[in-house]
Amino acid sequence: MTMITAPDRTEAAEYYFTYIDQVGGGDICAILENQLAETLALLNGISEARSLHRYAPDKWSIRQVLSHLNDTERLFIFRAFWFARGFDSPLPSFDQNIAAAAAAADERSWKSHLDEFRSVRGATLAFFRNLPADAWARSGIASGNPFTVRALAYIAAGHNTHHVSILRSRYL
């Protein structure tokens, strides 16, 4: 497989570079794989009771943050799938607050969230590792913004980095 490196500024709306820029350079599949181990090492140290912690009354619990990571990674990877497979119809936006309210994350066990994270990231890696080389440059519109498949891979990684940083600084 060819090493896939960071997208340029034409491959996604500027807003998404807040995530892409957190990833840095390097092969995205290796980055995603390393993140899996690093994120699980952090999260595995959180107890069932601690996973319900919120750093403020109006903020998500740790379980809700991980549920959001899982949902959003699925979303970014579905967009990447859609564009990689050549579909050209635009995809709708995503309201994270609607998704969070419907997920009932605090009603599930912490272990189930960890297992889901492992599975979602495993599926992400399988998808990206098996893309044809030309698929990485394919593009489409989601939430009214242009994206390449490559940009979406980096956005998924950067989104994980962003939320792990928040977990470390505000929750743990």
Image (cartoon, helix red, strand yellow):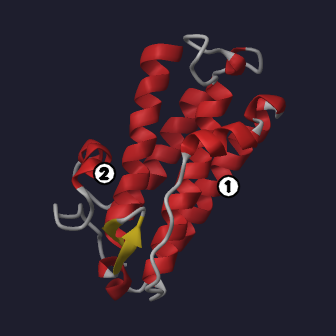
| Label 1 or label 2, whichever comes before in sequence order | 2
Q: In the picture provided, is 56 more to the left or to the right than 116? A: left
Q: CA distance from mark 1 to mark 2?
A: 24 Å
Label 1–label 2 contact, CB within 8 A:
no
The quarter of the picture where the N terminus appears is bottom left
How packed mark 1 is, by other alpha carbons closer than 10 Å (few <14, some 14-19, many 20 or more), is few
Q: Residue furthest top?
A: 56
- Look at 37% across and 65% down and name the residue there: 144
Considering only vertical position in the picture, is 169 above or below 37?
above
Query: Is there any visible trace of residue 31 in the rendered image?
Result: no
Residue 128 got which mark? none
- Taking depth in this image into account, of 91 and 106 the one nearest to the observer is 91
Quarter of the image where one finds residue 42: top right
- Look at 42% across and 44% down and name the residue there: 159
- Taking depth in this image into account, of 54 and 143 the one nearest to the observer is 143
Considering only vertical position in the picture, is 55 above or below 117?
above
Query: Is there any visible trace of residue 163 in the rendered image?
Result: yes
- Taking depth in this image into account, of 79 and 29 the one nearest to the observer is 79
Q: Secondary structure at mark 1?
A: helix
Q: In the picture provided, is 117 more to the left or to the right than 36? A: right
- In percent of width and height, residue 126 lies at 56, 70
- Look at 67% across and 30% down and name the residue there: 63
- In percent of width and height, residue 10 lies at 17, 67
Quarter of the image where one finds residue 75: bottom right
Residue 16 got which mark? 2
Q: In the picture provided, is 124 more to the left or to the right than 153? A: right
Considering only vertical position in the picture, is 74 above or below 19?
below
- In percent of width and height, residue 116 lies at 71, 48
Amino acid type at image mark 1: Ser
How packed mark 2 is, by other alpha carbons closer than 10 Å (few <14, some 14-19, many 20 or more), is many
Residue 119 got which mark? 1
Amino acid type at image mark 2: Tyr
